[in-house]
Amino acid sequence: MARVYNFSTGPAVLPEEVLKEAADEMLDYKGTGMSVMEMSHRSKAYQAIIDEAEADLRELMNIPDNYKVLFLQGGASQQFAMIPMNLMKNKVADYIVTGQWAKKAYQEACIYGKANKIASSEDKTFSYIPDCSDLPISEDADYVYICENNTIYGTKFKTLPNTKGKTLVADVSSCFLSEPVDVTKYGVIYGGVQKNIGPAGVVIVIIREDLITEDTLPGTPTMLKYKIHADNGSMYNTPPAYGIYICGKVFKWIKKMGGLTAMKERNEAKAKVLYDFLDQSKLFKGTVRKEDRSLMNVPFVTGNEELDAKFVKEATAAGFVNLKGHRTVGGMRASIYNAMPIEGVQKLVEFMKKFEEENA
Ligand SMILES: *Cc1c(COP(=O)(O)O)cnc(C)c1O
């Protein structure tokens, strides 16, 4: 059995250690005689798993006590609706549209109230982050919404927008736990875990307590109220139990690796290997404005579709898989999440060099 270098955008690479541990515990979790998959979520053993996962996440992100951590389902996409349903008290929200995910969130919010697109980078295929230092924030906006790392386009907010005192809501699906964050700057931080943390099926929502109220939009289903999940410790109904268990293992792995500061250094070192190569390559080019480059998702092109396809094919055969770019950008995209070792990126660059020589 050989493991490949998996550059998938999501579901994506997980730390090998975590997978091995999960395999060891598959048939008998800590003497319970059963798999975590087979366990009641109301059992003592499972309560310890979810409590520990939350405690480790709180420690890693330094989450203040006045924020709740919720483990939910429905993916990041369900949050596109849950956010307006729970937060739109004035039925007004401002959206900064820096990619497809932000656009989908904006379109969803339009169903529930007056969503304003206050900035966008769609004019240049979302290849940059607009200047957000002095935007026309609506006076009665319930929140300002961003997608902090744009998975498809490979851009990242290096400074948060000036929300002029309004609550900031951020989709961090593809940069979750990639670097330290100041949670106090946000009202809501959320993300699907299948990009940088765990298996698909879990979405983590970190939300300031004053934003959790009974006062949701009329018709909001019980399952889409933050309050019901907060009041029930994410166990109003059966949670995505096994997924949360794997997330917990990844939190422990990140702690062991040195926490988020160490993750950031590691991610910067990895991204540098690839970006430095792209910046001097005669064949491959990055598609993103340099100052807005993501540490997690790196799109690049040769400028020739046939050559792109040839590269993806040969890379796959050499064990570098899932490099095909999103259809709206074309070319290639390497997602180099926390769990991708630096050797994976170094070897990819060696392969790219060789391909460049052969196809000059
Ligand atoms: C993948 C992704 C989503 C969609 O996630 P689902 O869990 O499939 O709903 C939303 N936002 C961002 C930034 C993503 O990368």
Image: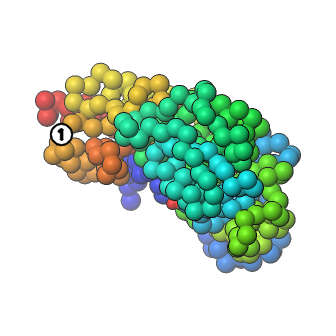
Q: Identify the image quadrant of the C terminus.
A: top left
Residue at position x 64%, y 37% in the image? 137
Measured from the top left, where is residue 74 in percent x and y? 60, 66
Question: Outermost residue toward the top?
Answer: 280
- Label 1 crowd bin: few (<14), some (14–19), many (20+), radius 10 Å: few
Of 285 and 17, the residue lying toward us? 285
Q: Identify the image quadrant of the N terminus.
A: bottom left
Of 86 and 69, the residue lying toward us? 86
Measured from the top left, where is residue 156 in percent x and y? 52, 35
What's under tag 1, amino acid-wise?
Asn
Q: Which corner quadrant of the image does residue 75 belong to?
A: bottom right
- 23 horizontally vs 308: left or right: right
Residue linked to disc 1: 304
Is 246 located above or below residue 44 in the figure? above
Q: Secondary structure at mark 1?
A: loop
Measured from the top left, where is residue 176 in percent x and y? 61, 45
- 277 horizontally vs 104: left or right: left
Measured from the top left, where is residue 344 in percent x and y? 41, 40
Residue at position x 23%, y 36% in the image? 302
Of 340 and 95, the residue lying toward us? 95
Residue at position x 15%, y 46% in the image? 306
Is 239 located above or below residue 193 in the figure? below
